[in-house]
Structures are given as structure tokens and as C-alpha cells.
Image (cartoon, rainbow, N blue to C red):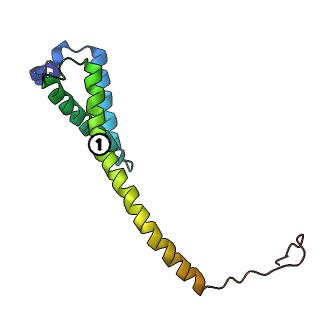
Amino acid sequence: MLLTIFAVIGIETWSTAALLGYSLLAGLILVLALSSQRWLLWYLFGGMAYWLAVEGIQSILAGRPMLSELSELHSYIIAMGISWLPLAGWVLYRALRYEDVSQSVQQQRKLEAARYIEHTPVYDDDDYQPRFH
């Protein structure tokens, strides 16, 4: 019966090991979705979406006449490099923004430190260990 239901996707050619493996994978994803660790699925789906984006960039590069002579490995490397450009731009933006923010934060901390007086006792003897009962 299972073979007739899934005949559309060609499941009749799958071996028993493939059926067991895919059903185990589907069961583990279902268990993960129902557990308290379901946030891990976002990493799974995010990774799939990222790789689909890399595949799309690679297929666009393979269609270009100048880049079609590259090997598949090189076109994937170029596609991954292109996909990292937004991340590099965001990191650069944050680094430049942090430089501006850090100066104002340092000034604010200096003003707050000037308001407070430290109340730490000063001992004459370096070996003195205070006893607290």
C-alpha cells in the first residue's frame, strides 16, 4: 500500500535501507520539532536556504559565457565568495559603527566613574587576611 501511495515520486525503486533511512530522518525531524530544542531546526532550514542561494549563484555563473569555462569546483568557490559579500559588508559596517559608539561609551563611563568613590579598605601589611565571621 505504501508503494502505491508514493508511486508518484518513484518510491518503488527505493531499497528497504533507503526507506528506513528516510523514515528515520523524518521521525527525528518530527521529534526535534516537538521538543524544546526546536530552534535547531532554524539552523537546518537556514543552511538549506543558504545552499540554495549558492546553487542559484552558481547556476547564474555557469550560464555566463566568460565563466562557463571554469570547472564546477571553481564556480562553486566563486559563488560562495559572492554569497559572503553581504556578510563582509555587515561586519565592516558593524566594525566602523562600533568605533564611533565605543568613543561615546568610553566618555560616558569616565563620567560615571568620576561620580563614584571607591570604598575599598587599604591595609598596611600585604599579608593581612581579613576574617569575616
Q: Which residue does the image show at 31% across and 30% down from the upper left?
A: 25
Q: Quadrant of the C terminus?
A: bottom right
Q: How many marks?
A: 1
Q: Position of residue 39 (x, y in %)?
A: 35, 49
Tell me residue 83's x, y (percent).
27, 38
Nearer-the-camera pick, 3 or 88: 88
Q: Which residue is mark 1?
A: 85
| Residue at image point 24% right, 33% down | 54
Residue that lies at the very extreme toward the left in this rendered image: 8
Residue at position x 22%, y 15% from top?
Answer: 14
Q: Is residue 54 above or below residue 87?
A: above
Image spot of residue 73 (x, y percent): 29, 21
Of 27 and 99, which appears nearest the observer? 99
Question: In the rendered image, is residue 23 in sight?
Answer: no
User: Residue 23, relative to residue 15: is it above or below?
Assistant: below
Residue located at (34% from left, 41% from top): 31
In-image side of 83 versus 129 (left or right): left
* Furthest-front residue in this view: 66
Q: Can residue 39 be seen in this snapshot?
A: yes
Q: Determine crowd level at label 1: few under 14, some 14-19, many 20+ residues with C-alpha closer than 10 A.
A: few
Residue 36 at what x, y percent from top left?
Answer: 38, 51
Q: Name the amino acid, label 1.
A: Leu
